[in-house]
Image: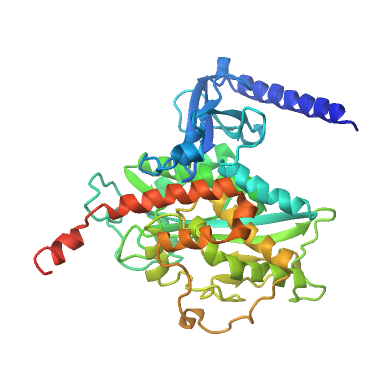
């Protein structure tokens, strides 16, 4: 097929998707369309467009500077070097596979995740969705398809409008907040039935593949598991779920927070990522050996890649200053890159399951991580291990936390490690990594400008 024929075929496919998308909106009497773009933090940016004016091109432009903006709304010092001197617009194109209703909207409203392109039609290097797509493309070149299943933890807390006031667990149906650890308690989950029923209703309306729900060890701490699927689909779903969970809680006068360590006396919240690889041509899990419980050499390479590169990728798994409170002071958070079979004290746990479900669970990411970047980073680490044919350490059968802490201890340390890792920069895109580091360093600097109440209490008159 000639280049012109391929171009014509691609255009025809795009036109068909466009027509199908517009028909979807018309059939549901949609009045408004939320054009969503996940930013570096993992929050939704974009525009709201009247449905009768929505098309492939109308209104779908955003400045590329949204990917060079800190969580506080500030710009790094090299902002115009990261973007462009003109602070140009990106072209947004809707992904028809992501169209969903906005179930909490008063009028019929749709939400569609958009991809970002340059004016020349190239995928924009700073967009997190394109970073993940870049890594998935590297797997496709090897005839492999990653399969993931995230587990997302979060807290329900009382509404708090004063940032100087500590967060507190909310009262449930009984009128009393939790005071004791309630791991896996059914009754403790039922305390928040009204909120969770609404969340499930919203998820059903949006076709989010939420699987199981459990109560975690923290007060009003819950965990939602997602059905395994391809990485882009799951990243989209986690992105939308966070938005959905916050809305469900807010409608009952409660906050849902995905902060990694929201309360000093409670455990942190993680986003564990189960991951395996399928051979594209036949769907066989390439991690599983021929015999029950046997693993392949490729599995070992993947695992060793995680062991080698996770410490240098921690800025994606723990992207905020608060993230390191979970890692350094968490009772069940990982302390190192040891691995073991069904061993939850390890950062890399290999569950005992059938050969087709052979996988590794990475326990490093916090619930505050951008799901696109966390998945891109963990898959990149594994692929580097396959490329370099690395060998893992022996599995740990005891308590891996007794083997010491060897992860970055702060966001600044993590960014230094990422900046020095040529392999990850090449895998994820050098321009993107540079922008990410610059944005996060600006956030780190802003944090250190704040004088805390602890400093005023203990240092003011004592030093």
Residue located 51% across and 80% down the image = 400
> Where's residue 411, x and y in %?
41, 59
Q: Out of 450 and 395, give the one closest to the viewer.
A: 450
Q: Is residue 104 left or right of residue 451?
A: right
Residue located 25% across and 44% down the image = 161
24 above or below 100?
above
Which image quarter is the C terminus in?
bottom left
Residue 173 visible within the image: no
Residue located 82% across and 28% down the image = 9
Q: Out of 19 and 8, give the one closest to the viewer.
A: 8
Q: Out of 432 and 139, give the one closest to the viewer.
A: 432
- Place residue 421 in its image quadrant: bottom right
Q: Out of 236 and 292, give the one closest to the viewer.
A: 236
> Where's residue 164, x and y in %?
22, 52
> Where's residue 275, x and y in %?
65, 61
> Where's residue 241, x and y in %?
51, 45
Q: Residue furthest top?
A: 52
Q: Is residue 379 left or right of residue 365?
A: right
């Amino acid at each position: 097929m000639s280049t012109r024929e391929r171009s014509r075929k691609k255009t025809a496919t795009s036109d068909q998707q466009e027509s199908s998308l517009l028909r979807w909106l018309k059939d549901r009497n949609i009045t408004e369309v939320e054009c969503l773009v996940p930013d570096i933090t993992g929050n939704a940016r974009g525009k709201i467009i009247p449905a009768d004016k929505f098309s492939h091109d109308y209104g779908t432009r955003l400045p590329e500077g949204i990917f060079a903006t800190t969580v506080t709304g500030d710009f790094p010092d090299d902002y115009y070097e990261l973007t462009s001197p003109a602070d140009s617009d990106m072209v947004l194109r809707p992904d028809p596979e992501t169209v969903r209703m906005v179930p909490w909207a008063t009028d019929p409203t749709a939400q569609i995740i958009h991809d970002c392109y340059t004016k020349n039609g190239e995928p924009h290097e700073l967009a997190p969705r394109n970073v993940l797509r870049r890594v998935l493309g590297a797997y496709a070149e090897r005839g492999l398809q990653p399969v993931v299943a995230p587990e997302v933890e979060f807290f329900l807390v009382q509404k708090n409008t004063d940032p100087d006031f500590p967060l507190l667990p909310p009262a449930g149906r009984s009128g009393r907040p939790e005071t004791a650890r309630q791991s896996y308690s059914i009754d403790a989950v039922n305390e928040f039935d009204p909120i969770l029923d609404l969340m499930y209703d919203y998820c059903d309306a949006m076709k989010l593949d939420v699987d199981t729900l459990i109560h975690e060890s923290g007060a009003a701490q819950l965990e939602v598991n997602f059905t395994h699927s391809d990485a882009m689909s799951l990243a989209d779903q986690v992105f939308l779920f966070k938005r959905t969970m916050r809305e469900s809680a807010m409608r009952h006068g409660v906050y849902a927070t995905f902060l990694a360590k929201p309360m000093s006396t409670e455990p942190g919240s993680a986003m564990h990522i189960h991951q395996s690889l399928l051979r594209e041509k036949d769907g066989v899990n390439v991690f599983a050996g021929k015999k029950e419980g046997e693993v392949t050499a490729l599995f070992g390479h993947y695992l060793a890649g995680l062991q080698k590169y996770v410490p240098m990728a921690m800025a994606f798994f723990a992207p905020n200053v608060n993230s390191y409170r979970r890692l350094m002071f968490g009772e069940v958070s990982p302390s190192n890159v040891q691995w073991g079979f069904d061993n939850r004290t390890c950062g890399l746990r290999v569950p005992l399951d059938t050969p087709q479900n052979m996988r590794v669970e990475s326990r490093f990411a916090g619930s505050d991580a951008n799901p696109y970047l966390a998945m891109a980073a963990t898959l990149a680490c594994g692929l580097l291990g396959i490329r370099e044919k690395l060998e893992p350490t022996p599995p740990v059968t005891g308590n891996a936390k007794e083997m010491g802490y060897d992860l970055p201890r702060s966001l600044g340390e993590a960014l230094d490690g990422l900046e020095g890792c040529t392999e990850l920069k090449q895998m994820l895109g050098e321009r993107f990594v540079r922008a990410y580091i610059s944005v996060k360093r600006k956030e780190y600097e802003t944090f250190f400008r704040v004088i805390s109440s602890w400093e005023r209490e203990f240092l003011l008159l004592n030093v």
